[in-house]
Image (spheres, rainbow, N blue to C red):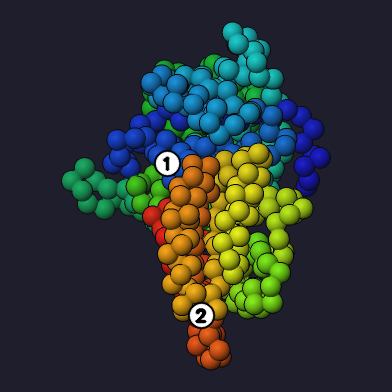
Amino acid sequence: MGRDAVDFPVAVVLPAAGSGERTGLATPKQFCTFLNRPLISFTIETFERIPWVKSIVVVVAKESRDPMLNIVQQFHHTKVKVVEGGTTRHRSIFSGLQALSESSEDPVLPRPKVVIIHDAVRPFVDEEFLLKITLAAKEQGASGAIRPLVSTVIATTSEGFLDHSLERTKYRASEMPQGFLYDVIYQAYQRCSEFDFEFGTECLHLALQYSGTSAKLIEGPPTLWKVTYKRDLAAAESIIKESLSLSVCLISGAMAETVELSSRLQKNLESHHMTVEVISCIKENNELLLKTRNFIQISTSGASLSETEEMVKVFEETKHALLYPVVIVQVQLCMSEEAADIRKNEELKAIVDLSRMVKQGNVLLYSVQIIYSKVPELWERSVERLTEIIESLIRDRNPVLIGQMLQA
């Protein structure tokens, strides 16, 4: 199966009108922020970067309409239409489907052949699996993701005692995304009862009961999990940070000492399963700058600050740091402890000022000083320590440490 197989219009409906009570937070979980973005923006991006998904309808509560429109504008989500939802999940989904109807009062979006319904708080779904769901929906009329049950399901008596248990191997957990021929699911919602609107949760059941369409069930990957509790937000952030830290661009400079240090760093980072691309300078390497969000600059002078400003200008012009923070680690190589003390005092204020300025553009600037040693064992230990610091800065993306001069 390939992308060319989707030669028909596909739309996505993201119900996001829930209050997220189970997280225990005042803010609904879909609007909770990490890495300078609300969770729902990550989910939108998942679909927006798929070329055959033509439109995304985000359904929100009335009081969340303006904040959602601000999110769409701030993060340049170009495929999104925001509509108001209802008092229950099914009412909100129906509102999203109506926005795609030819009879809609605002027919901006094309009527799709297939519509995907997905949770706004499930940001980790890949294109390959979405393709399976979409093609199965076109072929069968409906399709849905399933996962094996982790725990045995039991029934209890009214007194709180065990009544019976189900054989776990015969059952599956219904997950999102779910795909439907638009006419199938729209007809089902037009025919369903008030009881379904108030208490129903399963879209596949509505398609079966009211449109006579039995869904094709496809086992999905473990990444389909849903952000439900507060701890899940931290887990989602950790997963995204891990994916951002897999590659780095190392700017070595032209001096023999910085090139040698660059070679050692490259070897150490690659042994820790990072992909490292090495260049001598940033000039005429704009395409490479836009391939990653992690950079290491090695220098023996303050010239790296002007190079950083050039990089940030490229990021601003291309919106490269709009969706994810970019990390720049300046490595200052000092040939003696005396030179290190002088440089630290002279350059610290400049580093602080620059780091504060570029942070506004979602660029995290860190500075690490390493002192050269003629003793091989000490030098090797310092380079190992430098590697650990760089890895930690790239992985954690901690804004607290920007503007400081760390010592390797």
Taking the spot 66% from the left edge, 19% from the top edge, the residue there is 109
Q: Closest to the observer: 310 or 79?
A: 310
Residue 245 image position (x, y, % from top left): 56, 60
- Under mark 1, the amino acid is Thr
Label 2 Cα crowd, 10 Å radius (few <14 / some 14-19 / many 20+): few
Residue 324 image position (x, y, % from top left): 55, 46
Q: Closest to the observer: 318 or 247?
A: 318
Q: Secondary structure at mark 1?
A: strand
Taking the spot 46% from the left edge, 38% from the top edge, the residue there is 38
Dot 2 or dot 1, earlier in sequence? 1
Q: Secondary structure at mark 2?
A: loop
Q: Closest to the observer: 33 or 301?
A: 301
Residue 384 lies left or right of residue 139; in this view the side is left
Closer to the camera: disc 2 or disc 1? 2
The residue tagged 1 is 33
Residue 12 picture quarter: top right
Residue 343 image position (x, y, % from top left): 48, 67
The residue tagged 2 is 336
Camera sees residue 213: no
Please, is residue 332 above or below residue 240 in the view? below
Taking the spot 49% from the left edge, 45% from the top edge, the residue there is 357
Q: Closest to the observer: 293 or 262?
A: 262
Taking the spot 47% from the left edge, 19% from the top edge, the residue there is 84
